[in-house]
Image (cartoon, grey):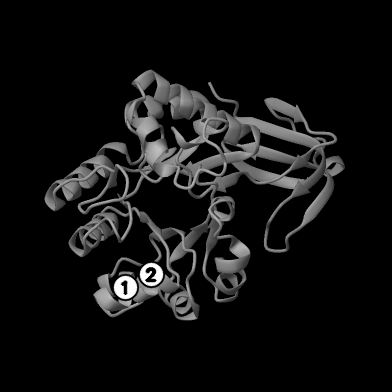
Amino acid sequence: MADQTLKIENARYVLTLDGQRRIIRDASILVENGRISHVGKAVELAALPADRVIDARRLLVTPGFVNGHMHISYAHVVRGIFPDELASPLVHVFALQDAMTEEEEYLSTLLGVVELLKNGTVGFVDPGSTKFPDACLQAYEDSGIRVILGECVTDQDAPFKLPRYATREAIARTTSFVEKWHGRLHGRVRAWAMPFSPETCSAKLMQALKRVADERGTALTLHHGSGPKARQEYAARHGRRPTEYLESLGVVGPNVVLAHVLGIDDAEIDCLARTRTAVVMCPVTAAKSGRGVPEHGRMPELLAKGVKVALGCDS
């Protein structure tokens, strides 16, 4: 039976991240029935009993981090295998996953989750990249982490190996996945619609998956980027910027999270703000590929416009 009350006491600092952004020195926290009930000076909470007490002296206590975009089951295991200067690692990364057994994906997922937890990350979004969802679910159950997952689908050609289906099948698979997985592990698992990208998914597919998310009270995430070349191509093909194209399809809004969003211009930032669409930036990935945040990332401008911005490690 889980402890009914938990006390984290005598922390050197507690970062509350509340409305006043308080930082409390020599502080304690009391958790009752899974919810924080008291935060304050250790001396003020000293008399409050708890079933379990964690001595946090000399430690910094913060809210848990959430990794907004991480391919959990395979990408991180290539560290030390592929050279850093490899021009296009994705082809090799997907080939590695294609060869994985169910046990190997469980173990690689568990390794990634353990690293997250040991560094204060209590939840993450996997953008539909798992090969054996049941094996990964076992890793999530064994570890206690929270996860948002889905099934990656495409219905167009891609430059590397991605799951491709007929449009109707992709819609059906997404619907079935959300219905099966959303709310598992006592709510620690959430399921989203996960088309891979606007370049690999038809307008019909993306619109249908947005409806799936809307009708089932969940969300949608996809890889998205812009830049001078992309804007030129989208203007020729769709008469709009990449982000405006998504808006024209209705594939934006408070329940949409766009990953990466490198190269967006001011008009696209306005589009994201207007539609209350959230973004996840992966600065390390951008820097490794020579498209670093200082050149193409627009985080200050996004925040200034009120766009919700999260961070992800990608792999």
Give the Cα separation between the discs numbered 2 and 1: 6 Å
Q: Residue at x 23, y 60 (%)?
A: 211
Q: Tell me the SS state at disc 2.
A: helix
Q: Residue at x 45, y 41 (%)?
A: 71
Q: Is residue 54 left or right of residue 301?
A: right
Task: Looking at the picture, tell me which residue is in the foreground, 151 or 77.
Answer: 77
Task: Looking at the picture, tell me which residue is in the foreground, 297 or 190.
Answer: 297
Above-or-below relation of 277 to 89: below
Above-or-below relation of 234 to 34: below
Q: Amino acid at mark 2?
A: Ala
Residue behind mark 2: 230
Q: Residue at x 48, y 76 (%)?
A: 265
Q: Residue at x 59, y 55 (%)?
A: 287
Q: Can you see residue 257?
A: yes
Residue behind mark 1: 234
Q: Amino acid at mark 1?
A: Tyr
Task: Looking at the picture, tell me which residue is in the foreground, 27 or 74.
Answer: 74
Mark number displayed over residue 286: none
Residue 95 % position (x, y): 36, 33
